Amino acid sequence: MIQRRTETTLERWLPAPATAPARLHAAMRYSVLGGGKRMRPLLCHAAGEALGANPQYVDVAACAVELIHAYSLVHDDMPCMDNDVLRRGRPTCHVEYDEATALLVGDALQTLAFQLMAEHAAAPDPGRQLAMVALLGQAAGSRGMAGGQAIDLAAVGMALSIEELEFMHIHKTGALIRAAVLLGAHAGAADESTVQELGHFANRAGLLFQVVDDILDAEGSTITLGKTAGKDAAQDKPTYVSMIGLGRAKELAAHLRVEAHAALDLCEVDTGRLAALTDYIADRSF
């Protein structure tokens, strides 16, 4: 239901493919619509539901986070980054269009995310909404996702410590997952204590997501994953599997799952949907 709702809302807010410049807008829609698990919108809506948020407020935050995520995938797949040719079971944006268009698609999706947060009500009061914009900006920037990607690129072929690997993924993957949870909470009646508890949960859930991703990259096939399997190992990237082995990576995922649930247990609101999503993250096979 939330995935369908998000898809419909994204389709409405993305520029129409016939609107000039048509090629850019078609490529934006190609990169966002018709694929993906919409995990970040699911987390955003689950947190919003727990805090009694207006679903229309959460739509804005959820779509903004998903647009940031989609832009990061477009740029991540480009030849100057991971140079991948497959995403969500079809050619990556720079393959389907071209590199220059893919670069502009990422730029345009990122700016559209903040345009949505500026144009539409996403919180009960303007002050809280302004804080949400700042939260999303930090999560996407050099102290969040973009910074994590920079660390990832610099780490190719290097031997990182487990602490350094966790630091990288807290930024590259975890920052946007944490933002999705906290934006949903801020769209509702979140007090400081609940925000801190949900933030701790999101840190564990974000790291869990990455560990499972590393396991799937090692065990999955290109067909089931919808992206090139084994790419991390081929590029000599440090992963949890390469550093501690497949068995211990699975043990770590199980431990992070327990920690995420324990963090939710401390919240004095109904976090049942967040708990179910934690299990989905841990158990996913594609």
Image (spheres, helix red, strand yellow):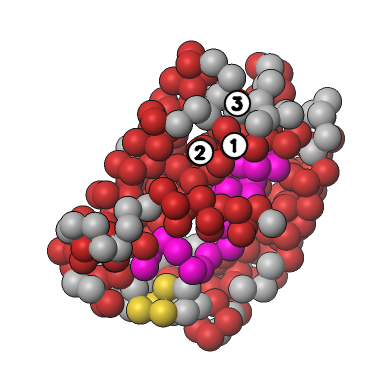
How far from the left and from the top, in percent, is residue 162? 53, 51
Looking at the image, do the residues carrying marks 1 and 2 touch, with CB atoms under 8 Å apart?
yes
Looking at the image, do the residues carrying marks 3 and 2 touch, with CB atoms under 8 Å apart?
no
From what the image shows, is residue 171 above or below residue 194? Answer: below
Kind of element beneath mark 2: helix
From what the image shows, is residue 275 above or below residue 240? Answer: above
Give residue 227's mark: none
Q: What is the C-alpha distance between the residues marked 1 and 3?
A: 13 Å
How far from the left and from the top, in percent, is residue 233? 44, 75
Residue 180 versus residue 160: which sits nearer the camera? 180
**Magenta part mainly helix, strand or loop?**
helix
Q: Which residue is mark 2?
A: 60
Looking at the image, do the residues carrying marks 1 and 3 touch, with CB atoms under 8 Å apart?
no
Q: Quadrant of residue 4?
A: bottom right
The N terminus lies in which quarter of the figure? bottom right
Span colored in magenta: 30-47
Q: Is residue 40 magenta?
A: yes
Dot 2 alpha-carbon crowd within 10 angstroms: few under 14, some 14 to 19, many 20 or more: many
Give residue 56's mark: 1
Q: Select label 1 or label 2 by which is in front.
A: 1
Give residue 186's mark: 3
Identity of the amino acid at label 3?
His
* Residue 92 seen in the figure: yes
Residue 250 versus residue 171: which sits nearer the camera? 171
Q: Is residue 158 magenta?
A: no
Q: Is residue 43 left or right of residue 33?
A: right
From what the image shows, is residue 21 above or below residue 196? Answer: below
